[in-house]
Image (cartoon, grey):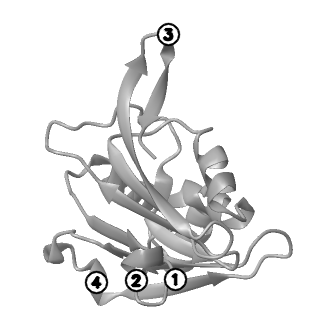
Amino acid sequence: MHQQLMGMAQGSGQPVRLLQHMHCLPLLMPYSCSSIAAWGAATKDGHLYQTRNLDWSLQAGAHDFPVLVVYLPDKGHAHMRPTFARFIGAHCGLNDAGVVLSEIGDASAKGRPCNPHAPHFSPWSHTLLYDAGSLTETLSLFGQVPPTKRYHFVFGDGRTEKKAVKIRSLCRRRPDDPGHQYLEGQ
């Protein structure tokens, strides 16, 4: 992400520090979004359908500059992420293996980041989209990174496993491993 920020700063003429601050907002702001996944008997044709609603303030104006970014890598899965101009990453996306990612904020004003040094989901989810070919692979990769704050994640697989899961990051310490934060649900 650092190289992308440097390139964005150079191309836009904006200071790197300003862009870094802008990219911290999703981590620091209290917001909550919506997501739904339905498959099997819950849908008319049995396919997985997953969506995410971004419930940010319209005063931010980001919705005025929507961008669909398509990645066609030499290695890994091709994928797409909806985002906004001047923002690297996204809180959702899908890849050519049928893996779908959604993140839902669960942060009240008191929900401060529990680990601000952990990779934020917005840029880190690139790894999931590049590397995961199924829901099982997505969960395995995702479980290797501690959460930055309380979130709900909805991950789906429309081709291999044809289902979705919802995970809530709790940002609490496990009693048996005081240095590790853990996730709940599936």
Residue drawn at x 46%, y 86% as measured from the top left: 67
Q: CA distance from mark 2 to mark 1?
A: 7 Å
- Disc 2 crowd, CA 10 A, few/some/many (<14, 14-19, 20+): few
Q: Is residue 93 above or below residue 111?
A: below
Residue 89 % position (x, y): 51, 67
- Residues under numbered marks 2 and 1 in contact, where contact means CB atoms less than 8 Å apart: yes
Q: Mark 1 vs mark 3: which is more N-terminal?
A: 1
Choose the circle earlier in sequence order: 1 or 4. 1
Residue appearing at x 48%, y 35% in the figure: 117
* Residue where numbered disc 4 is placed: 63
Marked residue nearer the N-terminal end (4 or 2)? 2
Find out whether the residues at labels 1 and 3 contact each other: C-beta distance under 8 Å: no
Q: Residue at x 79, y 68 (%)?
A: 76
Say what amino acid the circle numbered 2 marks.
Thr
Mark in front: 4 vs 2: 2
The residue pinned by badge 1 equals: 47
Q: CA distance from mark 1 to mark 4?
A: 29 Å
Q: Is residue 84 left or right of residue 155?
A: left
Instruction: Give the residue type at disc 4.
Output: His
Q: Residue 43, image x and y in percent?
A: 40, 83
Up-down: is 143 above or below 134? above
In which image quadrant can residue 35 be found? bottom left
Q: Earlier in the sequence, mark 2 or mark 3?
A: 2
Pointer 1 local density, CA inside 10 Å: few below 14, some 14–19, many at least 20: some
Q: Nearer the viewer, residue 25 or 140?
A: 140
Query: What type is the residue that disc 3 sits on?
Result: Asp
- In the image, taking residue 20 as reference, residue 94 lies left or right, namely right
Mark 1: amino acid: His
Quadrant placement of the N terminus: bottom right
Q: Secondary structure at mark 2?
A: loop
Q: Secondary structure at mark 3?
A: loop
